[in-house]
């Protein structure tokens, strides 16, 4: 399958605090993506600064770093055909009030800051985020149902 990708997804502290981790994982699994990495951590400032480095000059940067380091996050790696774009569709628009129902943010989000979840926005971003959050690499495993997910 030539379009196989692995993408990075993170349930942010607000999603963890609200008890939405299981619901979020269930949505990715039901769609057909395969979980190949999972960890729960409280990010260090250094990790947060590296992850959000592209926003360093933005006025919301310090608040973002404070928020993401305020409690546990659940970092995940998901694999599948077009996994990056599929994950972004499942996640929904950044502002929960504007996200369509059926998406994670559309069903559970009411804010642009507390937006529950992060997902890589492209192949380069996914590659760098996966390397940052999963320096040990992700799992390789065969899922028995694969023939029932893809033709």
Image (cartoon, helix red, strand yellow):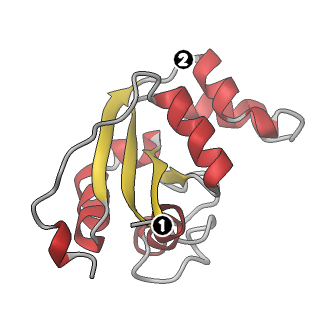
Q: Nearer the viewer, residue 4 or 87?
A: 4
Residue linked to disc 2:
44
Which image quadrant for residue 67?
top right
- Judge whether 102 appears above or below 129 on screen: below
> Cα distance, mark 1 to mark 2?
34 Å
Q: Quadrant of residue 27?
A: bottom left
Looking at the picture, how far across and down is residue 11, in whole percent? 42, 46
Name above or below for residue 69 compared with residue 74: above
In the rendered image, the residue lying farthest to the right is 57
Q: Which quarter of the figure is the C terminus placed in?
A: bottom left
Q: Residue 21 location in percent, x, y?
A: 29, 50
Q: Residue at x 60, y 71 (%)?
A: 93
Residue 39 location (% of width, % of height): 32, 31
**Element class at badge 2:** loop
Element type at mark 1? loop
Q: Give the residue drawn at x 47%, y 70%.
A: 86
Q: Residue at x 48, y 75 (%)?
A: 106
User: Where does label 1 land, which residue?
Assistant: 3
Residue at position x 56%, y 69% in the image: 96
Across and down, in percent, residue 121 comes to: 63, 57
């Amino acid at each position: 399958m030539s379009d196989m990708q692995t993408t990075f997804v993170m349930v942010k502290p607000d999603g963890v605090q609200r008890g939405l981790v299981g619901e979020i994982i269930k949505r990715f699994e039901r769609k057909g993506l395969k979980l190949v990495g999972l960890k729960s951590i409280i990010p260090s400032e250094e990790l947060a600064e590296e992850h959000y480095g592209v926003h360093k000059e933005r006025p919301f940067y310090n608040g973002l770093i404070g928020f993401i380091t305020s409690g546990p996050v659940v970092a995940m790696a998901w694999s599948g055909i077009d996994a990056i774009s599929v994950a972004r569709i499942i996640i929904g628009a950044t502002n929960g009030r504007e996200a369509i129902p059926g998406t994670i943010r559309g069903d559970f989000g009411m804010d642009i800051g507390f937006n529950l979840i992060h997902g890589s926005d492209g192949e380069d971003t996914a590659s760098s985020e996966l390397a940052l959050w999963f320096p040990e690499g992700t799992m390789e495993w065969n899922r028995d149902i694969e023939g029932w997910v893809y033709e």
